[in-house]
Image (cartoon, rainbow, N blue to C red):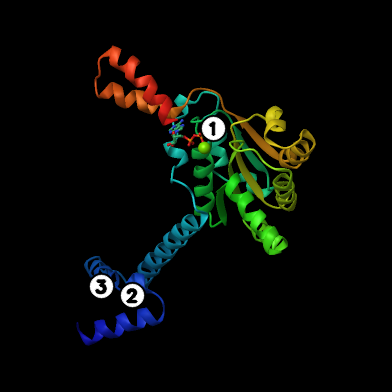
Amino acid sequence: MTDLHQRITQQLRTLSLKGLIDLYRPLAEEAAKNQLQYEEYLALLLDEETRGKTDRSVRTKITLARFPFLRTLEEFDFSFQPSLEEKTLVRLGTLDFLEKAENLVFLGPPGVGKTHLAVAIGIKACQAKKRVLFLTLPALLRDLSLSVRNGTLPASLLAYSRYHVLIIDEVGYTPITREEANLLFQLVSIRYEKGSILLTSNYGFEDWGKIFPDSVVAAAIIDRLVHHARIFPIQGSSYRVRDKIHRRKSAKPSPSSLISQGEGEIKASL
Ligand code: ADP
Ligand code: MG
C-alpha cells in the first residue's frame, strides 16, 4: 500500500465515505483515460457516493420494514388476475395515495396476491425513503396487548403512528377478542387521516362481523378505515395452486397422476 493510498483510505474512513475506498482508484484511471477535468472526476466520485448511500438507505428501510418476502409490482402477473386493473396498481406504485394518507385494502381468498401487492407497494415506499412496517394482525395485537400489560400503550400507539405506511396483513385468519378489537380501533383511529394503512383480509367487509366480537366494533373500525381508502376486491383462484400445477405440468406427469395425486398435494400445500 503506497503512502498516498494509505492516507486517502484513512481519510475516507474518517469521513464515513467507505464506499469510495475501492472505487476512487478505478475511477481515477477511467478519468485519466477519458481526460476528465479534476472537477469532473470529483463529480464522478460524489455521484458514486450518493448512489451508494441511497442504496444502503433503501436496503436498511426494507430490512426495518420486516417484509415476510420480497416481491415487486413488476413481478405481479396481471394476466392471471383480471379482477385487478394493471394501470391502477401501477399508479399505486407512484405512492399518490400517501399524500392524503389514504388506506389501501386488498380483499380476497387465499393465494390471489394480496400480500404480494402489499409488500410490492411497501417496497416502493421504502425506495421513496418512507418508513414502512409490515406485520400480521395477530402479531400487531400481541404487541399491543403486551404494551397494555406493561402500561406502555400510549407510547406503542405513538410508535405505530410514526410510520408512513403500516401494513396489516391477514385480517380474518384468527378470531379477535373484544379487548383486541378495541386496541385495533385505537390504532386505526390514531392513524386516521395521518398515515396510510395497507390491509389485507380474506373476508369481505360484509363478513367482518364474524371476525370481530360484534358487528358494532367491526363497523367502527371499517368506518375509519374506509373513509379515505381505495378498496380492491380480488377474485379468482390461487396463484399458489397455479404454480403447483405449472410445475407439475413441466415435469410432464401422466394426466391421471396429476388428478389423483396432485389435488391432495395442492390442498395440503394451501
Ligand atoms: P395472498 O396474500 O392473497 O394469500 P400471496 O400474495 O401470498 O397471496 O400470494 C401467494 C404466492 O403467489 C406469492 O408467492 C405471490 O408472489 C404469488 N402470486 C400471487 N398472485 C400472483 C400474481 N398475479 N403474479 C405473480 N405472483 C403471484
Ligand atoms: Mg397473504
User: Which image quadrant: the N terminus?
Assistant: bottom left
Q: Nearer the viewer, residue 199 or 209?
A: 209
User: Which image quadrant: the C terminus?
Assistant: top left
| Pointer 2 or 3: first along the chain | 3
Q: Quadrant of residue 5?
A: bottom left
| Pointer 1 or 3: first along the chain | 3
Secondary structure beneath dot 1 equals: helix
Mark 2 vs mark 3, CA separation in Å = 14 Å
Q: Nearer the viewer, residue 10 or 222?
A: 222
Residue 181 in picture, x, y percent from top left: 72, 44
Q: Amino acid at mark 3?
A: Arg
Mark 2 vs mark 1, CA separation in Å = 46 Å
Q: What residue is disc 2 on?
A: 38
Q: What residue is disc 3 on?
A: 25
Would residue 46 be visible to someone looking at this image? Answer: yes
Q: What residue is disc 1 on?
A: 87
Q: Is residue 34 above or below residue 199?
A: below
Q: Is residue 12 left or right of residue 82?
A: left
Q: Is residue 82 above or below residue 150?
A: above
The reply to whether discs 2 and 3 touch (Cβ–Cβ < 8 Å) is: no
